[in-house]
């Protein structure tokens, strides 16, 4: 496999991991907002 | 607005990931595996975020001792928890790189060792918090301990690796404290550090709010945890 091809694969995996963490944090933020509104 | 900022952070770090592999130079000289240097773009910002967390905890602890607002105490605890998380990630990424370049995951390099000592020091902070039941006494003791970290952390992160022989690459860590990296590498590293710092503060905001809610629930009321 050429280096640029290998790099593309690593970048895609990194982006998937980062997007997963990001969406999880975004969901946590929303859940916290809902819980904070409760008396 | 806050959601827009969060998406900007997503975009920023996504660009950093792209730049780390396609913008930064293909290979660094004098390495066993020349492309292995790219781990620098993630390893160094993680170590930096852990440092920011440990120093931040001291700042929030000072604020707690001045105001006695329990939210500041929980902000200090959250900063240390996240500092430990990023510190462990920096240790693991460093160990993976060390296996490739130095042949062993662990070499007792001064920088590896000083980060490990920092993690133990702040691990003891969490043990201290867990050992004291009275919330006010716990907060006071924990604040004093975290402020002690203002002396310990800079010594371990900045001084020890520079006064002892280190296996770490000279362009990144040297006795003069000057970076000798190419401008392309420096730019990506700086962008990554900015992104990780923003990520740290976002996670810190979430973790503090989580701790406040947990504390409110266990105390059965507001108990002065308002912002």
Image (cartoon, coloured by chain):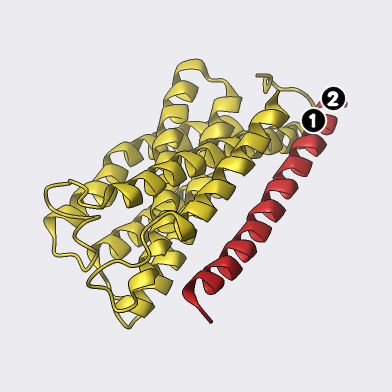
Chain colours: A red, B yellow
The quadrant where residue B59 appears: top left
Q: Are marks 2 and 1 in contact (CB under 8 Å)?
A: yes
* Chain letter of the residue beneath label 1 in the structure image: A
- Residue drawn 29% across and 66% down? B28
Helix, strand, or loop for circle 1?
helix
Using the image, tell me which numbered label, if any, was put on residue A33: 1
- Residue drawn 27% across and 43% down? B154
Q: Residue B171 vs residue B88: left or right?
A: left
In which quadrant will I find the C terminus of chain B? top right
Q: Residue B91 vs residue B155: left or right?
A: right
Residue B171 coordinates in the image, percent (x, y): 21, 56
Using the image, tell me which numbered label, if any, was put on residue A37: 2
The quadrant where residue B148 appears: top left
Q: Nearer the viewer, residue B155 or A3?
A: A3
- Residue drawn 38% across and 65% down? B26
Q: Is B188 located above or below residue B30 in the figure?
A: above
| Label 1 CA crowd tier, 10 Å (few <14, some 14–19, many 20+) | few
Q: Is B100 located above or below residue B182 in the figure?
A: below
Q: Nearer the viewer, residue B81 or A26?
A: A26
Residue B172 coordinates in the image, percent (x, y): 25, 55
Q: Nearer the viewer, residue B183 or B120?
A: B183
The quadrant where residue B117 appears: bottom left
């Amino acid at each position: 496999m050429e280096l640029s091809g290998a790099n593309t694969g690593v970048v895609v995996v990194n982006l998937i991991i980062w997007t997963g963490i990001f969406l999880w944090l975004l969901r946590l933020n929303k859940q916290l907002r809902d819980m904070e509104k409760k008396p | 607005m806050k959601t827009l900022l969060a998406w900007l952070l997503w975009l920023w770090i996504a660009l950093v990931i792209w730049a780390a592999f396609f913008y930064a130079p293909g290979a660094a000289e004098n390495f066993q595996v020349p492309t292995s240097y790219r781990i620098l773009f993630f390893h160094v910002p993680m170590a930096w975020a852990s440092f920011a967390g440990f120093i931040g905890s001291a700042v929030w602890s000072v604020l707690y001792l001045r105001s006695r607002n329990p939210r500041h105490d929980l902000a200090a605890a959250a900063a240390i928890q996240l500092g430990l998380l990023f510190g462990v990630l920096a240790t693991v990424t460093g160990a993976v790189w060390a296996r490739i370049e130095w042949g062993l995951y662990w070499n007792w390099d001064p920088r590896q060792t000083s980060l490990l000592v920092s993690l133990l020091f702040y691990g003891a902070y969490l043990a201290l918090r867990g050992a004291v039941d009275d919330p006010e006494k716990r907060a006071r003791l924990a604040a004093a301990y975290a402020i002690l970290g203002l002396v310990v952390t800079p010594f371990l992160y900045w001084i020890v690796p520079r006064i002892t022989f280190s296996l770490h690459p000279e362009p990144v860590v040297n006795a003069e404290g000057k970076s000798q990296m190419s401008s392309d590498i420096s730019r990506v590293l700086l962008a990554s550090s900015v992104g990780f710092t923003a990520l740290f503060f976002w996670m810190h905001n979430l973790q503090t709010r989580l701790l406040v809610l947990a504390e409110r629930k266990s105390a059965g009321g507001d108990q002065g945890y308002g912002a």
